[in-house]
Amino acid sequence: MHVSAVRGFGRLLITAVLATALAAAALVAYYRAGANAQGGAPGAAAKSTVGSGAGKAGKAAPGGAGQAPVPVTVAAVTQQAVPYRIQAVGLAEAYATVAIRARVDGQIVEVRFREGQEVSAGSVLFNLDPRPFEAALRQAEANHQRDLAQLAQAERQEARYQELLAKNFVSKEAYAQFKTGAETAAAAVLAGKAALENARLQLEYTTIRAPIDGYTGRIQLQKGNLVKANDTLPLVVLNQVHPIYVSFAVPERELPSVRKYLAAGPLSVEARPPNADQPEIGKLVFIDNTVDSTTGTIRLKALFENRANTLWPGQFVTTSLRLYQQEDALTVPSRAVQTGPYGQYVFVVKPDMSVEVRPVGVQRSEGDLAVIGTGLARAEQVVTQGQLRLGPGTRVLVKRDSGAS
């Protein structure tokens, strides 16, 4: 064996012996200190310490003997009248939508509104070049005057030949020709009058007006563009938002109840846009005649006055349809209800200030309240805050929930 290897092995052996000696000295000092502190044998002290630690490790439980009560907030189970509501996500829809199109061909010479402006029914939106239609109107007026003159001449001739026929100075065939001429002239006058009215109407079409109250959208064709009558592309789209609709869908199982209570009287609907302080209040006005078989829902529609423009077409809102008032409903704050592997439960505070886990049946939620169907009785105390540190039998230090209703 190499001399350096022998030397290295010797150093390792010496180091191990020294470490063992130091550990033995520390163990002796520990036993002596335990014996001095308890006035007994070192072994007894060590055994007592080990046994106590094992007991704590095997039997520790939340709120057990010797542990301080867990501070929690509680609220009482109350019995009160709670409205029955159906919650859904709704979509605001314009009360009326009109795509504004030209009814005659022409060039836009003036745009009389701004994009997004609120306009009234009858207000002017666009002006088309009226000169070709003014010329056509003058021509129609002239033709009508000519027809009137011809009719007057034909009537005079017919009257004169009628007198001659009465004196047998002309034949009946000759008189019939003049009578036919007078009737033809009268028909020409009627045709000319219709052409004149049409020319006036065409001229009126060069002024494009708003048919309803509403808000304008983006202008598709600006001043100077040529437009065609009833073109595919509208000049602008007008939406009426006073009033406004909100459509929403509810499960088909709710349809019998909705029809029942709607037959008894108007049903109130609330619509709350995102970040709105107060909801808009409207009424249910429409139930679709078909259930959507793909989703199992029925489409409803509510009408809102929307005076403050809180609702806007295309906006998603939270809707709440109120059907009736449930009297004497058992309620707890929603935050008291927990969800576990076996369903929903609450922590009930018993008279001895310990808690038990109580399964409950929650019928529905109404705002910050949970309506309880089974599992609780009136005036019982349930934990609303601090559940994470609780277990069956945990002792608690309670304070009433100031936010409970």
Image: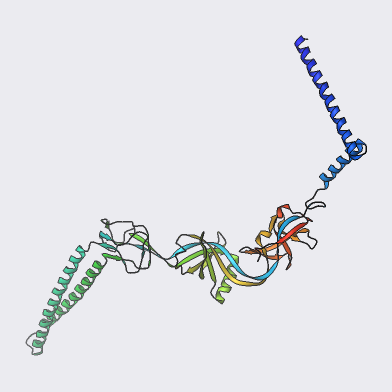
Mark yes or no: residue 331 visible.
Answer: yes
Residue 26 as seen in the image, left or right of residue 83? right
Q: Position of residue 391 (x, y in %)?
A: 76, 54
Q: Is residue 400 left or right of residue 222?
A: right
**On screen, 206 above or below 153?**
above
Q: Position of residue 262 (x, y in %)?
A: 55, 73
The image quadrant of residue 335 is: bottom right
Q: Nearer the viewer, residue 25 or 166?
A: 25
* Picture residue at 18% right of the left edge, 74% below the top: 188
The N terminus is located in which quarter? top right
46 on left or right of 246: right
Q: How many marks?
A: 0
Q: Is residue 215 left or right of residue 226?
A: right
Residue 54 in percent (x, y) is at 84, 42
Would residue 297 be visible to someone looking at this image? no
Please provide percent x and percent y for residue 331: 67, 66
In the rendered image, the quadrant that contains the C terminus is: bottom right
Q: Quadrant of residue 230?
A: bottom left
Q: Quadrant of residue 141?
A: bottom left
Residue at the image point whose x is 54% and y is 72% from the top: 267
The residue furthest right is 40
Q: Is residue 393 above or below residue 58?
A: below
Q: Residue at x 11, y 79 (%)?
A: 153
Q: Which residue extends farthest left? A: 169
- Relative to the observer, which residue lies in front, 237 or 56? 56
